[in-house]
Amino acid sequence: MFIVGLLLLSLSMEAAQDGWRPPSEMLYTAAEKHTSVLRPLGLTRGSFTLVFVRPGCGECEREMARIQDSPRTIIFVDGPAVWVKKFNLRRARVVESTDAQRSQMGILMLPTIVRVEDGRVTGVRSTAPRID
């Protein structure tokens, strides 16, 4: 039992070191709710990065400047046309964000970056200050 605990602690520390946290630590909804956002967008097979941002959020804009423009990047934003032009997004998929999507995903802070693999959230990062 002690060895298993050490292994889990080690894995948790590795995840925290690369910036990714377990979904249960960063999202306030259960995995079943995430499906209602992921499935309609066809995010059930493969690896994707979801980026939740909002206009007027300085930290969101700084995060967007670092985002990789890839077909596997899905950006959820209010007023997507402005962001496509502003950040010269040619390959990333930009989606009109809704309060319902953010609520179903359990997003509390913006910006929040979510790693999805085969329809499951596997990691979450947020550059917003964490409130404990």
Image (spheres, rainbow, N blue to C red):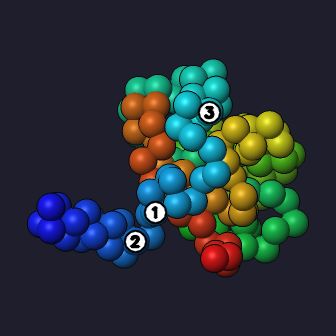
**How busy is the neighbourhood of tag 2: few (under 14 within 10 Å), some, or many (20 plus)?**
some
Which residue does the image show at 44% across and 57% down from the upper left? Answer: 22
Q: Residue furthest left?
A: 3
- Work out how far the residue at label 1 is from the one at label 3, CA to CA, in angstroms: 18 Å
Q: Position of residue 15 (x, y in %)?
A: 35, 66
Of marks 3 and 2, the one in the foreground = 3
Q: Position of residue 4 (x, y in %)?
A: 17, 61
Instruction: Name the residue tied to disc 3.
Output: 33
Task: Specify which label sits upstream in the sequence, 3 or 2.
Answer: 2
Instruction: Name the residue tied to disc 1.
Output: 21
- Work out how far the residue at label 2 is from the one at label 1, CA to CA, in angstroms: 6 Å
Discs 3, 2 touching: Cβ within 8 Å: no
Q: Dot 2: what SS?
A: helix
In the image: residue 61, left or right of residue 93? right
Which residue does the image show at 53% across and 37% down from the upper left? Answer: 31
Q: Amino acid at mark 3?
A: Lys
Q: Amino acid at mark 1?
A: Arg
Which residue does the image show at 81% across and 68% down from the upper left? Answer: 57
